[in-house]
Image: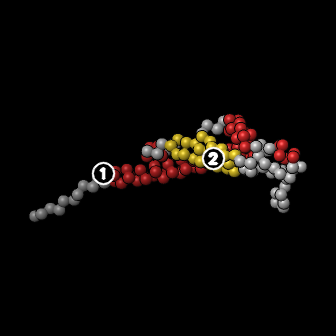
Amino acid sequence: MNACRIRDDSGQVAPLVAVCMLGLLAVAGLVIDGGVLFSARRDLQSVADGAARSGAMAVDEQTLRDSGGNRIYLNPGKAEVAVTDYLNLVGFAGTAETTAGVESVRVTLHENHRTVLLSMMGIRTVETRASSTAGPRSAIAGPGG
């Protein structure tokens, strides 16, 4: 008489749970770190906008006076100094690139942020970037500002 042996399947769930936990950890890392990085990117964009607006206020006053208020240009040197002063005032700790001309000033900011859960998967830092361009304005140009 041949007896049928029933296979012992204890422990079969352990590998499945381990794989599912890795997937769950990856999704949680994307959600948590993604939210933190989204917030950091928004804050960085706010700083870039403020720095560009600060630089755009460095008007070449002599040209404005000589033209009777008809021509408004930036003083590029003063604009770059205004951007640097603004970034120091808000405590910006990343790297900044400033390009100033007579018509506009462009600020590009870079910051590295440490990840929380994604660092367990080998992604230790993520770079965020933001840039903004602003130009001088002397009055309301038309309807809507």
The outermost residue toward the front is 66
Which label sits on residue 108?
Answer: 2
The residue that appears at 64% across and 49% down in the rendered structure is 131
Tell which residue pokes out farthest to the left in this image.
1
Q: Position of residue 5 (x, y in %)?
A: 18, 59
User: Along the line of sight, which residue is nearer the eye, 68 or 2?
Assistant: 68
Quadrant (top left, top right, bottom left, bottom right) of the C terminus: bottom right
Q: Quadrant of the N terminus?
A: bottom left
Q: How many marks?
A: 2
Dot 1 falls on a residue whose secondary structure is loop
- Secondary element type, mark 2: strand
Provide residue 37's location: percent of width, then percent of height. Answer: 57, 47
Q: Nearer the viewer, residue 91 or 122?
A: 91
* Res. 24 in view: yes
Report whether 74 appears left or right of 115: right
103 on left or right of 32: right
Amino acid type assigned to the residue bearing label 1 in the image: Gly
What residue lies at 36% left-to-right and 54% top-to-bottom? 16
Above or below, 89 against 27 in this view is above
> Whole-percent x and y of residue 12?
31, 54
Side of 3 where 102 appears, left or right: right
Task: Quickly name the residue at label 1.
Answer: 11
Residue 31's disc is none
Q: Quadrant of residue 54?
A: top right
- Residue shown at 29% from the left, 52% from the top: 10
